[in-house]
Amino acid sequence: MVNIQFIEHDGKEHSVEVSTGGSVMHAAITNGVPGIDADCGGSCSCATCHVYVNAEWLGKVGELSPTEEAMLSLSTDRKDNSRLACQIQVTEGLDGLVVTTPEFQF
């Protein structure tokens, strides 16, 4: 099992424990974490699972694909550490991952 820490834009924390193999978006949705809308269901065709990856984890979550880059370019709240949670696969190496949700999903 892998622990993922979700922090809402207002600082409220949600710690979830999930199996490997799914996405960070799926971990949030199945555990009722607020702030992740996931309108497209994880097909990387929207930006409603936008998260900010804690700096220490940026090198461990993988690279942005061109499609993810295009979807994130639609977000007005984009930062250097922005990612789509549907594109981050949960692996054992992500045990302890910390992500923060933006105030709004677009």
Image (cartoon, rainbow, N blue to C red):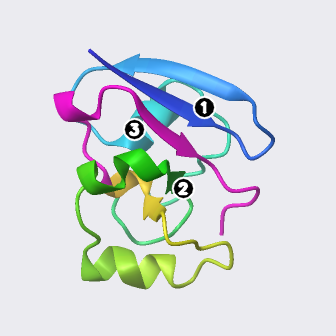
Magenta part, dominant SS: loop
Q: Amino acid at mark 2?
A: Tyr
User: Residue 23: in sight, yes or no?
Assistant: yes
Image depth: mark 3 or mark 2 in front: 2
Image depth: mark 2 or mark 1 in front: 2
Question: What residue does disc 2 label?
Answer: 52
Residue at coordinates 67% horizontally, 72% vertically from top-left? Answer: 77
State the quadrant of the C terminus.
Answer: bottom right
The local secondary structure at tag 3 comes to: helix
Q: CA distance from mark 2 to mark 1?
A: 15 Å
Left or right, 36 with respect to 92, comes to right
Give the extent of the magenta segment: 88-106
On screen, residue 100 above or below 87: above
**Crowding at label 1, few (<14), some or many (≥20) Cα neighbours within 10 Å?**
some
- The residue sitting at the right extreme is 10
* Label at residue 26: 3
Residue at coordinates 67% horizontally, 27% vertically from top-left? Answer: 13
Q: CA distance from mark 3 to mark 2?
A: 16 Å
Q: Amino acid at mark 1?
A: Val
Question: What residue does disc 1 label?
Answer: 33
Q: Is residue 92 magenta?
A: yes
